[in-house]
Amino acid sequence: MTGTDQHSGFASWVGRSETTQDVASRSAAIGLGALLDCPLDPDASDRAALFPLGHWLQFTPTAAMSELGADGHPRLGGFIPAMSLPRRMWAGSKITFHIPVIVGQRLARVTTIESITPKNGASGRLCFVVLRHDIAAEGRPAIVEHQTLVYREAVTVDQAAATHRPPRSAGPAPDGWDWTRTQQPDETTLFRFSALTFNSHRIHYDLPYATGVEGYPGLVVHGPLSATYMVDAFLHENPNARITDFEFSARAPIFANESVYVCGRTAGRGVTELAVIAPDGQAAVTARIKIHTNRE
């Protein structure tokens, strides 16, 4: 099948949308505070603003157990078309924040398939799916997110025979950043984040599956968890900042029990560049944050 044929095969899916409803969860906000070691005061959380990425803890998947695939995700063919690419990764997001979302508010999310793009890469066939999420709080536009998912081919028998390797230790703190923090997410961290987001993807908790089926050397740290670490670190450095835009890109996987550096530096007025530096010294996740300034 040519690239043109693949595009035409998915053309009828582009533009499809679905709407889901939720209520901004107090318990999820408290749970995320616990995960980030910043416990929220339960008495002050009834009308608190969600963490900037707290919408990821809302609208959690509702697929029945019988609707899940071998990897733990809902099987394709419902909202997103079926394709012969079984490995899924959240490759990144671009998010605009219009107003804060407050605990207890009624939420509505309209998700639209913006594009489906098959490609051939060095690792084989890929397919990029871009979803647009428009989230309203009590009827007011609150958040717009463009989420990119990538689907990949199954690994070969040799690749799937990868053996579990010891976690890599972090090297010296990287130069050229205004600030750095260290993180070492372990199995408990991954379980808690999966529970908060109701994410049943087995690469995050099932070690035999992660190594023997998907060919990873260990349990995979969630891309959105790394993004959450970056925003949390930024807010510790800039506690009064109001984030208007955030985008992140997952470039390489990080594995459970590895020590990583979360780094940030000024990249212009109201703009901060961030990265999660893996133990090999490479940027595994990159991001940019834009904040409201007095000139805006």
Image (cartoon, grey):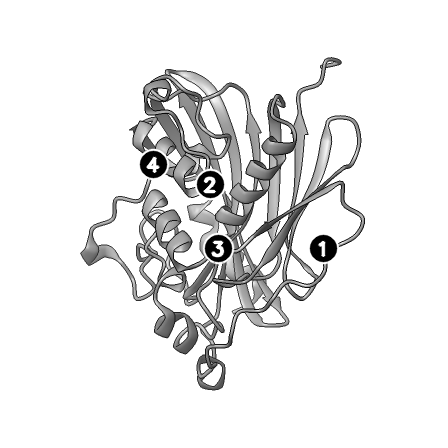
Q: Where is residue 90 in the image (x, y as percent from the top left)?
A: 50, 52
Residue at the spot of label 1? 173
**SS of the residue at dot 3?**
loop
Determine whether label 2 and label 3 are within 8 Å by CB. Answer: no
Residue 105 coordinates in the image, percent (x, y): 34, 19
Instruction: Choose between 277 and 111: the one closer to the eye.
Output: 277
Q: Are the residues flagged by discs 3 and 1 in contact, CB closer than 8 Å?
A: no
Local secondary structure at mark 1? loop
The C terminus is located in which quarter? Answer: top right
* Residue mark closest to the camera, 4 vs 2: 2
Of pointers 2 and 3, the one earlier in the residue sequence = 2
Q: Is mark 2 on a helix, strand or loop?
A: loop
Q: Report whether residue 69 is seen.
A: yes
Residue at x-position 72% and y-position 13%? 294
The residue pinned by badge 4 equals: 59
| Mark in front: 3 vs 4 | 3
Determine the CA span between mark 1 and mark 2. 21 Å
